[in-house]
Every structure is written in structure tokens, then in C-alpha cells.
Amino acid sequence: MPTPAWEVRPTGERRRLVHVNATARGGGVAELLHGLVPCQQAAGLNAGWAVIGGDEDFYAVTKLLHHLLHGTADPDRLRPGSVRTYRERLAPQAAWFTEWLTRDDVVVLHDPQTLGLAPMLSATGARVAWHCHVGADIPPDRGPGAVWRAFAAELSAVDAVVTTLPEFAPPSVPLARRFVAAPAIDPSAPKNRHLEPAEVAALLDRAGLTADRTAPDVRVVQQTTLPEGARVVLQVSRWDPLKDMPGVVRCLAGLAPDVHLVLAGTDPTEIPDDPEGLAVLADVEKTLAELAPADRARVHLVNVSMRDPLGNALLVNALQRRADVVLQKSLEEGFGLTVTEAMVKGRAVVASSVGGLRQQVIHERNGLLVEPTDLAGVRAALTRLLDDPALRRRLGEQARNDTLERYTMTRLVTDYGAIAGSAEE
Ligand code: UDP
């Protein structure tokens, strides 16, 4: 069993605030922690970040938990044996923490992968919060209930549960221990900072999207060159079934012939806690094969490596700036950082009316909300924005203002301050 690796170490004797998650790169939580931890340190906190490890069996269980919390898996699939495997994989890693944690420390466990550490960490006297970034507006019997029941012991060991929306919290946790904090972005990070049009063009060229070349850290799976004047619809996502990338491909037929789709995702072989990526990518390629050749040539699949985190961040930034419309056609979504990243760049967004996206996007004010399973409705929203530059500008400007007001890292640092403060009362 791999030992947890420190990504950022708290230093000195002062009270430590330690975040724990399952991956250093790839996905929204890793992205969030790369921004949050330095921001908390800048605010004077002794903040750090540890990353747990796992094996195939462990990640099969944690991915099931992820789907159950989104209501997209059968609750009967969560068997006592799965819960046992999950706990067995975490126990040696908990021991690694308990060697040095004290009652003065605060630990924030992120997402279902780390919840199982709670009883052992809490036994040290340290304050333990669980920040669950996933959730869906579904009745508990569709999946979350099974997770809450199986992990009742873990949930009773945490001092605070943090969710993006109040309704995502486990009902068994007393109200006084429930907190709501939406994720946030750093507008000055490489992922979001301003890029001159020439930089955008150079980054897309380097990635092989607009020029015929192969970049070392980018695999353009669908190798056709994006024409300079093409109108672009972009979705950036992990290759996760809930992001519905095949559904995005199906949107193309029916859009004007100069509209191109760019689907960008992290190389699925590089995210250990996301075992479904290759199958989803294969599904996307199968869907592509069903398109007429002329339509297929208007779809670009970009598979970005995390081996070069700066290059990855700049490429995502460039893609979001190149896009005329940014789509997030998720079937469920606790919160979509990709949407907030697009909005802070003043992009017009079309997002599914699900979960946290409904909080991020206010229909007709700063973007458009759609029913993800209504392909005709998604196409109509895309076409409406693509054909109306003034509307795109109006929604995009509002999107930027709303994002700067509601979703920047300093707000999250303040939220965490309140959570840690009340956990002590
Ligand atoms: N991301 C990235 N490169 C990619 C695909 C995604 O850097 O090729 C980032 C994206 O910019 C965002 C995060 O991964 O910051 C995804 O977060 P989100 O909340 O949208 O979804 P999650 O993956 O957590 O479900």
C-alpha cells in the first residue's frame, strides 16, 4: 500500500490545517487544492495537503460511491465486502497520519475516497471535517442513502460536513455540523490569467489543434485541423460517464457547418482514482465513428497530459478563450469548476440544469441552462448563442462579474475560517 505523499507540507509548531484527497492532479478537487492551499498559507494559516494512495479494488469502490452519490448506480451494488475493502485500504494510511496528528490540528477530508479515515483521525483529538464535493438533487433512496447507511460510523466521527448545496448533506448529520461552501477559482492562476490572442493562437498551434504537429503532452485523438474562422463549442471534462462526452458529440449534427466541437479531457491513464476514463474515451470514439465523415471532421478530441501541469493549465485556458460557447452537458454535477473557469473569462456558457450548475449559472442572466437529455434543446441553446454575438457578450460580461463576486479563492478561505472556528465551539 503506498504511503500518503505530501504535496504541500505544513511547517513549524503552529496548529496545522491539513487537506487530504486522493489525487494530486486531475479533476476539480486537485485543481481547487492547488489554489486553496497557497491562498490559506498567504492568509497566515499553517496549511498543507496530503494525497492518499489506493489500488484498483479501492478505486472501484470509490468510483461506485461517486456514482451512488450522483444517483447513477444501483444501491444494491454497495456490498459489505466493498465497504470492507475500502476500510482495509485506508487503515494503514490512517496510521501514517495518527503518528503525528494532535488535538490542535484540523484535517479536511475531501470526497468519498477519504471519508473512511475519519474515525481513526478523529481518535487523535484532531478536528476532522469532511468536504463532499459531489451531490445531486435526487431522493436518498436513489443512491446516497446507501452510502450514508454504510458509512454511518465515519459520518458520526466528523466534526463538520461541508457540501456545495445544503441538500447534498447526509440527513443523519446534525444541522449544527453541516456547512455549505461552494468551490472557487484563482483568477490569476495560469488556468485563468489573461492571455493575449497571439498566446492563445500559439498554444493551440503547439497542441496540434490548429497546426499539423504533435505536441509531446497532448494527444489530439481526432486529428483534423481546426480552421481559423470556425465557430467553436468547447467542453472540457474528465472522461467520466456523467460528463456525457458522447452526448456532446451527438449535438453536432444539426449545428451550422462552420461550427466545430472541441472536447478536451485529461489523459485517462493519469488519474488513478478515475478508472472509467479509457472506456468513456472509447465510447466517444465509437460515437464519432457513427457520424458522417464531414461531421466527424468537425469534432476534435484533445487528450491532455498532466505530466506538464503548467502546459495543461495554459492549454485549457487557451481553449476556453478560443471557444465561442462553452458547454457543460453533465448528467449530474456537484459543481463544475470548468464552468466557473469559462465564466471568469467572459465566455457564454450552456450548462445542464443539474446540481451545483444550477447555482453557478443563472438562466438568461449569465448563461443558459438546458436539460442535458434534451438534445434538440441543447442544440437550440448553442445555436442561439452562436448566432447572436451581442447576447454572448452580454451573458459573458455578467458571467465574469458574477464569478468574481461569488467564486474566488478569498471567499473560500473565509468560508473555511468560519467552519474551523465553529468546529471548535
Ligand atoms: N481539467 C484540466 N485539463 C483537462 C480537463 C479538465 O485541467 O484536460 C481541469 C478543469 O480545468 C477543472 C477540473 O479539471 O479545473 C475539473 O473540475 P470540475 O469541477 O469541472 O469537474 P470534476 O473533474 O471535479 O468532476
Image (tube, grey):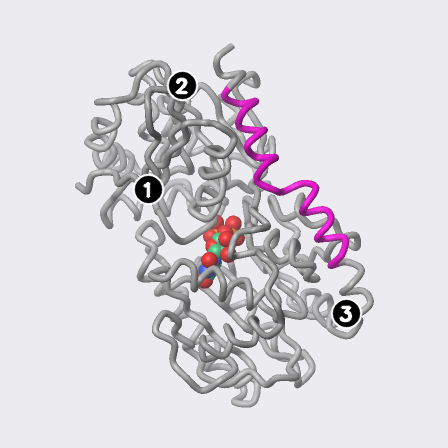
Tag 2: residue type?
Answer: Arg
Q: Are marks 3 and 1 in contact (CB under 8 Å)?
A: no
Which portion, as a residue range, is magenta? Answer: 396-420
Q: Secondary structure at mark 1?
A: strand
Specify which label sits upstream in the sequence, 2 or 3.
2
Specify which label sits upstream in the sequence, 1 or 2.
1
Tag 1: residue type?
Answer: Glu
Judge: label 3 CB < 8 Å from ligand 1.
no
Residue labelled with disc 1:
7
Check residue 43 for magenta coloring: no
Q: Secondary structure at mark 2?
A: strand
Give the spatial CA distance, label 2 vs label 3: 50 Å
* Image quadrant occupied by the N terminus: top left
Above or below, comparing residue 269 to residue 416 in the picture: below
**Can you give x and y, in whole percent of width and height, for residue 333 in the image?**
55, 48
Which residue is at a point 39% across and 26% down the rendered structure image? 107
Of circles 1 and 2, which is in front?
1
- Prevailing secondary structure class for the magenta stretch in the rendered image: helix
Confirm whether residue 241 shows in the render: no
Label 1 crowding class (10 Å Cα cut-off): few <14, some 14-19, many 20+?
some
Which residue is at a point 63% across and 55% down the rendered structure image? 352
Specify which label sits upstream in the sequence, 3 or 1.
1
Q: Which mark is residue 127?
A: 2
Residue labelled with disc 3:
384
Of circles 2 and 3, which is in front?
2
Label 3 crowding class (10 Å Cα cut-off): few <14, some 14-19, many 20+?
some
Label 2 crowding class (10 Å Cα cut-off): few <14, some 14-19, many 20+?
many
**Can you give x and y, in whole percent of width and height, for residue 160 in the image?**
48, 22
Q: Secondary structure at mark 3?
A: helix
